[in-house]
């Protein structure tokens, strides 16, 4: 497990966002990127996560392809979960990569991409 301050964790999120490749990362709009220590009980329940399952990040919102031209909608939200990411990391560089990977994955959901397409695009970065 890696232990970092909240300020450092936020700085790592900011660095990860700046490092993401291409048009998909650069053109996100109307989306809040936050972090929490862990998923809330409501988030775990809505995702039907078992007690032994963990979650690194979560996209909540209306993916772009499903908006049907709507422009007046609430901001979407990506939440990264500090404790699961920290427990999965062996050092700060590993944590930085986990954050980057998780953020990219959740941005992919914002664009309405499925897991296969997210991984394909990530491989081309």
Image: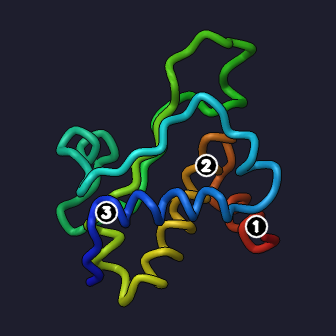
In this orientation, which residue lies closer to the viewer: 118 or 80?
80
In this orientation, which residue lies closer to the viewer: 71 or 91?
91
Horizontally, residue 95 falls left or right of residue 39, namely right
Secondary structure, mark 2, is helix
Secondary structure, mark 3, is helix
Q: Residues within 10 Å of mark 3 (few under 14, many from 20)?
A: many
The image quarter containing residue 87 is bottom left
The span from disc 1 to disc 3 (Cα, nearest Å) is 26 Å
Please name the residue shown 72% across and 68% down the image. 122
Horizontally, residue 27 falls left or right of residue 52, namely right
Horizontally, residue 120 falls left or right of residue 54, namely right
Question: Looking at the figure, which quarter contains the C terminus?
Answer: bottom right
Mark 1 or 3: in front is 3
Question: Looking at the figure, which quarter contains the N terminus?
Answer: bottom left
Residue 104 image position (x, y, % from top left):
61, 59
In this orientation, which residue lies closer to the viewer: 37 or 39?
37
Residue 14 image position (x, y, % from top left):
53, 57
Furthest residue to the bottom? 90
Q: Mark 3 points at which residue?
A: 82
Mark 2 or 3: in front is 3
Marks 1,3: beta carbons within 8 A: no
**Against 32, is 2 above or below?**
below
Asked whether the viewer can see residue 53, the reply is no
The image quarter containing residue 46 is top left
The span from disc 2 to disc 3 (Cα, nearest Å) is 17 Å
Asked whether the viewer can see residue 12, the reply is yes
| Disc on the earlier residue, 1 or 3 | 3
Secondary structure, mark 1, is helix
Q: Mark 1 points at which residue?
A: 120
- On residue 107, the disc is 2
């Amino acid at each position: 497990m890696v232990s970092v301050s909240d300020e450092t964790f936020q700085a790592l999120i900011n660095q990860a966002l700046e490092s993401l490749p291409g048009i998909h990362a650069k053109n996100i709009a109307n989306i809040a990127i936050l972090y929490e220590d862990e998923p809330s009980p409501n988030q775990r329940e809505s995702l039907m996560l078992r007690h032994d399952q963990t979650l690194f990040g979560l996209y909540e919102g209306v993916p772009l392809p499903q908006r049907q031209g709507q422009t007046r909608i609430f901001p979407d939200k990506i939440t990264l979960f500090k404790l699961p990411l920290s427990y999965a990391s062996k050092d700060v560089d590993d944590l930085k990569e986990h954050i980057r990977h998780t953020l990219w994955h959740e941005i992919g959901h914002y664009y309405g991409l499925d897991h296969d397409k997210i991984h394909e695009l990530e491989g081309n970065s």
